[in-house]
Image (spheres, rainbow, N blue to C red):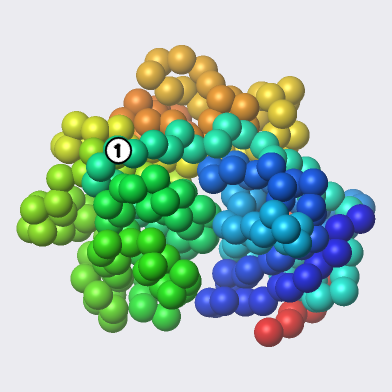
Amino acid sequence: MFDVLERKMIVPNLHQLTVLAPDVAKVIEPGQFVIVRADGNGERLPLSVADWDRASGALTVIFMEVGASTGRLAALMPGDRIPTVVGPLGRPTALDRFGTVACIGGCYGIGSLFPAIRALHEKGNRVIAFMEARSGYLHYWQERLAPYCQRLFLITRDGSAGIKGHAGRIADVLREEAIVPQRIFVNGCTFLIYKASIELARFDVPVIVSLNPIMIDGTGMCGVCRVTVDGKTRFACVDGPDFDGRQVDWAELLKRRKQYVDEEAFLVHDSGCGRRHP
C-alpha cells in the first residue's frame, strides 16, 4: 500500500496527487510514467510523473478528473492509502544539450513536461516554454517552470492571459521572436500534440510528443496501446511514450482514442462517485 501525502485540485478538474513511493522515486527519469489504482477493484491508470523527491520518496502526478476512475483518485485525501503505484514505466525522454528547445505543455501536460524542462535547463539548453489553456484560470505551476525557462509564454484560446490562440499560434510566435528551435517537446491532450506536430513540422526538427493512447498493463503484453509511427507498429508503453510527432499516424490514433467513449460515459453516470473534496 502507498500512502497519499497530498491530493488537491490545482485548477478546475485538474488534480495534483503526491504519494509515498520511494522505490519508484529513486529511479524515475523525465518522460516516464506510473500506473496507479485508487482501490483494489480500480482501473489501472497510466499517469506521467510530474515531479519527485529522491530523498523523501515522494512522487507527484497531475491528472484530469474525467471519468469514474479519476473521480475516485480525486476523492483521495492525505492519510488514505492506494494499492498500486507501478513504475517507472516507458523509456525516459532523450535529453541532451541541443541548444534552443521549445517546450509546449497543455492541461496535465504542463506538469508532466516539468521534469524535462528542468533537466534541459540543467544540461545548458536555452528553454523557451509555452503554457497552453482554454483560459487563463487553467494555467498552473508558472512559478515552478519560470526559473528553468529563458522565456515563458502563456497562450489562451479566449485571450484572457498572454497570447490569444492555440497550438497553431506557437509557430507564429517563434518566427516573430526570431527563435529557431533545435528540438521541440510537446505534452498534453492528444488534440494538442497532434496540432502542434502538424504546425511545428515546418521547423524541420524533431517534434517529440508523449503519446497517451488507451493502455492497460503498461508492459507491452496486451498490445492495446499500439500506434503506428513511421509506418511501423509500436507500443507506447515500452517503445515510448515519446515519439517524433511528425511520424505518427494521427488519423489512426485519434480514432482509437474514441473507441470506448460510450462505455466511459456510462461508467461516469453509473459509478456513484459523488464524494468531492476541495
Which residue is more in the foreground, 128 or 44?
128
Image point (79%, 46%), residue name: 23
Q: Is residue 227 visible?
A: yes
- What is the three-letter code of the residue carrying label 1? Phe
Q: Which residue has dot 1 on it?
A: 98
Q: Position of residue 165 (x, y in %)?
A: 23, 65
Work out which quarter of the rendered image holds the C terminus and state it: bottom right
Image point (62%, 27%), residue name: 238
Q: Position of residue 42 (x, y in %)?
A: 84, 53
Work out which quarter of the rendered image holds the N terminus and state it: bottom right
Which residue is more in the foreground, 86 or 189?
86
The reply, left or right, for residue 111 in relation to residue 165 is right
Which quarter of the figure has residue 134?
bottom left
Which residue is more in the foreground, 104 or 56?
56
Q: Is residue 266 visible?
A: no
Q: What is the number of callouts on the image?
A: 1
